[in-house]
Image (tube, rainbow, N blue to C red):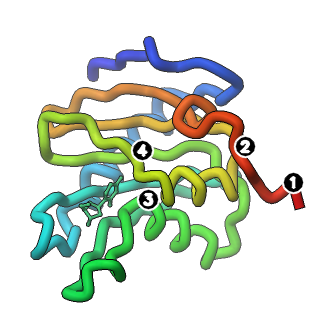
Amino acid sequence: MKMDQSHTIGAAKDLEPELMLELINQAQSAYRHAYVPYSHYPVGAAVLFSSGKIYSGCNVENASYGLTICAERNAIFNAVTQGERQLMGIAIAVPTEEYPSPCGACRQVVREFAVDCPVILINGSGKTRVTNLKKLLPDSFGPEFL
Ligand code: THU
């Protein structure tokens, strides 16, 4: 597996290689279930929480387009529904050559459950790029402000 770590900065704790691989595998599996009749852009996400468990999600679109939910939020909400609260890392996979990039709304939802964490992006060739939340969402607002 090729890992480009050049984008990694800040305080995100590195994940163990086995956990990283498992996150990548689960994110890639998840996009196979994506419901994308409108965009035809499947996305899969897998999230590691502090219990050590991994949860996954895919994007689910709707004929009323604005009701579409991204893969990242489905994965995180799935975990939170099981009682999880502390997000340790997220992997996002797509079948296209262009690497995925989490939308602004999903970045903020990640921020709700992690001040910083590794974000692994996987393209359709299985190449990975590792970045982190602080880079994707600098000067962020979060629950501690309230
Ligand atoms: N989408 C995701 O699931 N995650 C992202 O990171 C970017 C966008 C979905 C929403 C919609 O189903 C499709 O991709 C096109 O925007």
Left-right relation of 84 to 32: right
Residue at position x 42%, y 44% in the image: 91
Q: What whole-number distance in Å separates the C-alpha atoms at marks 4 and 3?
A: 9 Å
Does the closest atom of ligand 1 sit within 8 Å of the Cβ of label 3?
Answer: yes
**Could you tell me how far apart the alpha carbons at marks 2 and 3 are, in whole angstroms?**
16 Å
Q: Which residue is mark 2?
A: 115
Please identify the quadrant where the C terminus is shown: bottom right
- Which numbered marker is on residue 33? none
Q: Secondary structure at mark 4?
A: strand
The residue under label 4 is: 91
**Mark 4 is on which residue type?**
Ala
- Residue at mark 4 to residue at mark 2: CA–CA distance: 16 Å
Element class at badge 1: helix
Which quadrant of the figure shows ligand 1? bottom left
Pair 4/1: label in front = 1
Q: Earlier in the sequence, mark 4 or mark 3?
A: 3
Q: Amino acid at mark 3?
A: Glu
Q: Whole-Å distance between the Cαs marked 4 and 1?
A: 25 Å
